[in-house]
Structures are given as structure tokens and as C-alpha cells.
């Protein structure tokens, strides 16, 4: 097994095991509708084995960030179509990451009538950019009622259906980085006393329902899941409990036959303290994708040692649209250019050139 070998992802033929990780770039309209330049951006990166398009909300309640795209109505679906078409015309494959921001956001960023939801009324610490008031503290979320939960589960499955209609090859449920499903999983953001809080199985129930709903909507082989054990939002969690939570989750997933499980991490996961990725690899019987701090060499090693089936790259895909060719030919990578990650322009978005000798 090698990094540049093709890969059969549940019947979808990927040209290599190099995946473009989901990257929020905030280029959509203020109504969360994708724009034409996004077709150019993703089309430029179609030589990735698979593109996982940026976190996209399944609900008006889930657009906590300015200018993030959504996919919950016909206008948004039609606007995604040219994007998936361009990627396919250029020989690529593309999943959509379905991301409900939950409490990570500000009410000013939501459309009229929408609610900033969370499992409990506990605000995320820190500040977030808003459309009209600059940076503001995260809003205190509305604790979701059982009916709100039912609606949110349904919204994920409708989004999955719309994604297939818009031409995506599948969806990735965003269960990582402190967004809504992860907020239910963590004790620091979930103090509910009903069926969705307390025990590990209760805290995982919301995610399990989303997974089942998406599988029912579009089929198991079109559904992936991303989680981020011991990273991002997990810093204040009890590590013993957390490890067991992820092992419970992975055991549960063994009967689900998903397209893949995607683990993301900030920092070096290959430290003595962090053995969870290896434990998960042993326990999990499906396709495993890893992400976070990989170089080509580290990725090749992980694939050859069979620690993963796929490796996704985030920051390097931003400035290197031809990342796969650069890797294959040992061409120099462009510097990571943070300044333009979230600006609403083509600068630092579609203006990175292919390698020129
Ligand atoms: C600008 C930017 C936007 C990101 N947006 C998302 C996102 O929408 N969804 C997600 O799951 N992760 C997101 N991430 C995390 C990346 O997918 C990836 O996990 C991270 O960059 C680590 O991988 P790397 O070391 O290869 O860059 C983002 C990262 C960056 C730098």
C-alpha cells in the first residue's frame, strides 16, 4: 500500500490516498449561498484523491460563522451544483462536510428567526467575528428541546439528500472540533439530565441518530464521520472518560459500514501519551483516514505501516492547488499564508499557481 496508489472508497475510485481536508474559507454570500469562485477553487484542487468540501450548515440555526455556506434550501443546492460539476469534470471526487456550529457562533450571524442552539445553555469561551459588530463574545446558546433535537437530526439527513442532488459523492458528518454533535459528546458543554446527557451512551445518542438518519437518507457508503479525540474542544474533558467515549463510539461504528472514519488532531499525535489513534485503528473494522500535521513522508510511512488507509491534508492544500503533483515530484511547497484564510476575496484563494519549473 502506497500513498499514491488508487483507493476504492466503497465503490468510489480515488486516484490516490491523498485527501483534501475540509477547510472553511468563508466565501459564501451573507445568505450562506455558495458563489462561483468556489467552483474555480475546488476545481483547481481536483487532483486530490478526494476533496472534502468545507464545513456547510444543514440548518439556518447552524451558520454561526459569517459567510459560511449552508445546504438546506433549493437556492443553496443549485449554487453547489457547478462546484461539484467542475470537480468531476476535472477528474476529482468530492464529499461535503455537514457542519452545524451549534453554540460556536453569534446570534448576529444567523438569519432572522433562527436560534443559536446547544445541548445546554453554556457559552463557548472566546470571541467570534460577526457581520455587523466586529468581534463579540460567543452567544449563550438556547438549550435544545427534544423537538429541537428531532428537527436537527432531520436537517442533517435532508442536507445529505440535497448534497447528493447537488452532485456530491457523499457527505462527512462533522462530529469534531467542538461543533454541535461534539458539544453533546463533551461533559463541559452538555449538562443535560435527559436521554441526551449524563452517561456516555446518552451523550453519543445525538450523533448516533444523525449517523442513522444520514445512512437511511443516502446509504452507508456515502456517509463518512469526522471526530477529533483529545483535540480542539476536548481540553477540559476527563481524559479517562474521553478515551472510553471514543472507544465506545468506534465499537458502535463497527456495525455501521460507513464510507470512512476521519480522525483529526492538532499537534503531534504520535507521542507516547497519545496512543488512541493506534487503539482505534485496531478496534475499527472500516476505512480510517487521519489528519493533522502530516508531511508527505509521514503520510507515506503511515500508509505503508497500515496505520491509516487515507491521509488528509489541510493547510498545504490552501496554497498548493497541485499538492499531489508537488508531492509526487518532490517540488517545493508554497508557504502557508494565514492572512487570506478567511477573507472574502479571490486573493489567497484562487490565485495560487501550479508549480512552474
Ligand atoms: C483555514 C482552515 C479552515 C478549516 N476549516 C475546517 C472545517 O471547515 N472543518 C473541519 O473539520 N476542519 C477544518 N479545519 C481543520 C483542517 O481540516 C485540518 O484538520 C487542519 O488544518 C490540520 O491539518 P493540516 O496539519 O494538514 O493542516 C480548518 C483548518 C484551517 C487551517
Image (cartoon, rainbow, N blue to C red):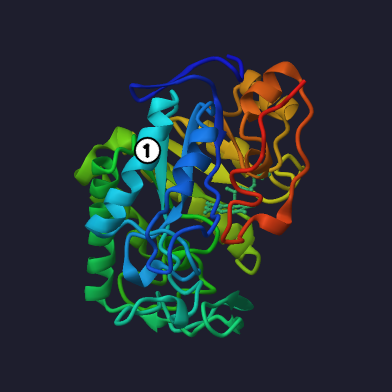
Would you place residue 138 above or below residue 342 in this image? Answer: below
- Image-based side of 33 in relation to 153, left or right: right
- Residue labelled with disc 1: 84
Q: Position of residue 201 (x, y in %)?
A: 38, 59
Closer to us: 88 or 105:
88
Q: Position of residue 356 (x, y in %)?
A: 73, 24
* Camera sees residue 212: no
Quadrant hosting residue 316: top right
Residue drawn at (51%, 77%) of the image: 131
Q: How many marks?
A: 1
- Image-based side of 297 in relation to 323, left or right: right
Quadrant hosting residue 231: bottom right
Would you place residue 346 above or below residue 319 in this image? Answer: below
Helix, strand or loop status at disc 1: helix
Mark 1 Cα-neighbour bin, 10 Å: few <14, some 14–19, many ≥20: many
- Image-based side of 309 in relation to 172, left or right: right
Q: Position of residue 110 (x, y in %)?
A: 40, 76
Is the CB of the residue bearing disc 1 within 8 angstroms of ligand 1?
no
Q: Position of residue 45 (x, y in %)?
A: 54, 34
* Camera sees residue 215: yes
Closer to us: 72 or 347:
347
Q: From the image, which quarter does the N terminus lie in?
A: top right
Closer to us: 180 or 247:
180
Closer to us: 197 or 37:
37
Would you place residue 40 above or below residue 150 in this image? Answer: above
Residue drawn at (37%, 59%) of the image: 33
Q: From the image, which quarter does the C terminus lie in?
A: top right
Quadrant hosting residue 210: bottom left
Amino acid at each position: 500500500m502506497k500513498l499514491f496508489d488508487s483507493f476504492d472508497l466503497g465503490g468510489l475510485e480515488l486516484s490516490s490516498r491523498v485527501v483534501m481536508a475540509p477547510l472553511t474559507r468563508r466565501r459564501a454570500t451573507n445568505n450562506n449561498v455558495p458563489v462561483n469562485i468556489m467552483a474555480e477553487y475546488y476545481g483547481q484542487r481536483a487532483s486530490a484523491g478526494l476533496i472534502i468540501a468545507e464545513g456547510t450548515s444543514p440548518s439556518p440555526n447552524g451558520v454561526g460563522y459569517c459567510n459560511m455556506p449552508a445546504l438546506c434550501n433549493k437556492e443553496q443546492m443549485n449554487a453547489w451544483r457547478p462546484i461539484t460539476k467542475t470537480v468531476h469534470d476535472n477528474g476529482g471526487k468530492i464529499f461535503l462536510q455537514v457542519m452545524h456550529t451549534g453554540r460556536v457562533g453569534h446570534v448576529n450571524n444567523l438569519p432572522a428567526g433562527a436560534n443559536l442552539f446547544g445541548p445546554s445553555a453554556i457559552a463557548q469561551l472566546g470571541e467570534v467575528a460577526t457581520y455587523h459588530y466586529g468581534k463579540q463574545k460567543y452567544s449563550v446558546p438556547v438549550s435544545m428541546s427534544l423537538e429541537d433535537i428531532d428537527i436537527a437530526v432531520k436537517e442533517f439527513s435532508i442536507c445529505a439528500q440535497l448534497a447528493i442532488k447537488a452532485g456530491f459523492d457523499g457527505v462527512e458528518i462533522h462530529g469534531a472540533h467542538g461543533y454541535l454533535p461534539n458539544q453533546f459528546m463533551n461533559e463541559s458543554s452538555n449538562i443535560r439530565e435527559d436521554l441526551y446527557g449524563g452517561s456516555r451512551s446518552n451523550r453519543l445518542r445525538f450523533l448516533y441518530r444523525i449517523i442513522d438518519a444520514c445512512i437511511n437518507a443516502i446509504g452507508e457508503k456515502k456517509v463518512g464521520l469526522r471526530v477529533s479525540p483529545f483535540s480542539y474542544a476536548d481540553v477540559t474533558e476527563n481524559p479517562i472518560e474521553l478515551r472510553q467515549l471514543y472507544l465506545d463510539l468506534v465499537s458502535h461504528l463497527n456495525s455501521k459500514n460507513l464510507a470512512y472514519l476521519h480522525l483529526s488532531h492538532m499537534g503531534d499525535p504520535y507521542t507516547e501519551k497519545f496512543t488512541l489513534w493506534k487503539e482505534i485503528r485496531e478496534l475499527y473494522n472500516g476505512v480510517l483516514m487521519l489528519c493533522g500535521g502530516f508531511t508527505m513522508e509521514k503520510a507515506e510511512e503511515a500508509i505503508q505501516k497500515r496505520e491509516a488507509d487515507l491521509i488528509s491534508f489541510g493547510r498545504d492544500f490552501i496554497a498548493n492547488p497541485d499538492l499531489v503533483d508537488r508531492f509526487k515530484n518532490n517540488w517545493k511547497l508554497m508557504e502557508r499564508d494565514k492572512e487570506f484564510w478567511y477573507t472574502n476575496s479571490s486573493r489567497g484563494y484562487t490565485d495560487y499557481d501550479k508549480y512552474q519549473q
